[in-house]
Amino acid sequence: MASHGLPSLATLRLGAATGMPGTDADGKRPMKASRVEDAEDAAPQAEPEMLLLTHLPRDVIGKIVTQAALDARKAAVPAKAICAWMKHFCTTARMQGVPCDDYWYKLALVTFGVNPDAVAEPPPKWMRGDTKLKKNAKLSWREFFGSLCDALFAKPMNLQIIKEKLVSLNIYNPRQRWLDEDLLELLYDFAAWINRTHHPGAGLGTQGTMPIVKADWGALMRGQYPAYLLSYEFWPLMGLLLLRGAEPFTEDKWLALDHEVYVAIMATKGDALSAPERLSTDEAIRRIADAVARGAKVGVTINSPERRAATLTLTAAIQANNPEIIKWLLDHGAFVGSPRMNIKLQYNYMRQLIDMTVYDVGEWQADWPTTKKLLKHSVKFFKNAKENNEDLFSEAEDILAIALDHMVANGFADDYYPPEDTMNIVDVAEYEGEQVGVGMKAKIYEYWAKIGDAFWPDE
């Protein structure tokens, strides 16, 4: 494990004192040393002082394990590093006659972002449910750590599933929402697993199975043995998220927070149908910033909690035609494209941007630098659609072609003006041959045309 930078076991001579003379650190007899012809002239080799776990206080050993867990984070696969290190550590400790303290396994969970000081000394009862109803069920950190390692590496396919469903496993100080959403991902996967393994053909679907999931979860939290949960191969990962502070079934709370962002954006529009009150831009931005600080998403918001209809925050801000909110969102990481982004949300963004910059350009409030950023973001939709959704890409082609025709017919390409210091004095025609400025409409037309040329070069 030295390649991963974990504390070396060699310095402790772990495994050297097995009680059997003539054995090495792995308990094997050493190979016979090569013969030295001139033994009398050979320099004596000093044996390194043997340091055994039996010589160390419990808190010092705990610091060794904690440091190993922290160093494991630097490994290519942190979980694999700490799982292998603990196995070696406790094996060699037993060879010295030192029982592997259950507390050490709790400390080793630091690799996965668990703060041991925030978790009670005895393992929580939900780790195994009602031990009276199952023989040999032990509430121990060792058992939980082992089951976690098994869940991570029992099958090669698991790593890909974890990569997709547990993004924050590699984030050691995640926001509460990330933890809750990772746990929810696993709960939905658990529901699908129940359908596959216990109710095939019943037609329950994931939503239909969620009452079973909630009942099983409730039983475990009450200290009872659940019907399905502990048989689910990724249950230890749920337990890990609980140890890190995740809370289950909190999606409605977070969706309501996202809705606050949408309401604040639309309240600047002054449309009674869009928001219950009219807000100044400054007040709207204050409310948006407050909601984001409490966990609202800066990229995606909810415009209808009842139907859980989502929209991009940038789409809403474009619809509200509020350049200051658009700039705030862009400055704080609002986005259009991401690996997990629903392409329909990107499509709606593109449609809204075309509506405002082409058909309602006379009312468009944003300056050119901001508009250019928005246009650049729309490229992510076209790229995603071309690679992953042929039908939507074809539909987008028609929409953009109609928009370009409209811009040509309405003189967007002819939107030029003379130098700023004279444009109100002399007619543009008198400046033939001199450099003239390009107006907003011409810039918008040129950018949309470049997008069309990039994705439909042969048309």
Image (cartoon, grey):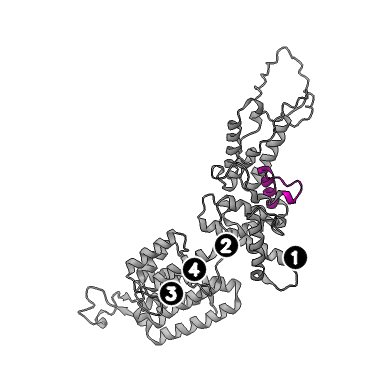
422 relative to 390 in the view: left or right: left
Q: Residue at image x 45%, y 82%?
A: 404
Q: Which residues are magenta?
A: 132-152
Residue in the foreground of this view, choosing between 446 and 144 = 144
State the separation of the CA atoms marked 1 and 2. Answer: 22 Å
Residue 320 percent coordinates (x, y):
39, 75
Q: Magenta span has 233? A: no
Crowding near the residue tagged with mark 1, few <14, some 14–19, many ≥20 C-alpha atoms within 10 Å: few
Residue 62 percent coordinates (x, y):
60, 35
Q: Which of the two marks, 4 or 2, is nearer to us in this view?
A: 2
Amino acid carrying label 3: it is Tyr
Amino acid carrying label 4: it is Val
Q: Which of the two marks, 4 or 1, is nearer to us in this view?
A: 1
Q: Which residue is mark 1?
A: 198
Amino acid carrying label 1: it is His
Task: Say whether marks 1 and 2 touch (CB < 8 Å).
Answer: no
Task: Give residue 30's quadrant in the image.
Answer: top right
Amino acid carrying label 2: it is Phe
Residue 450 lies, with reference to residue 236, above or below; the image says below
Q: How many marks?
A: 4
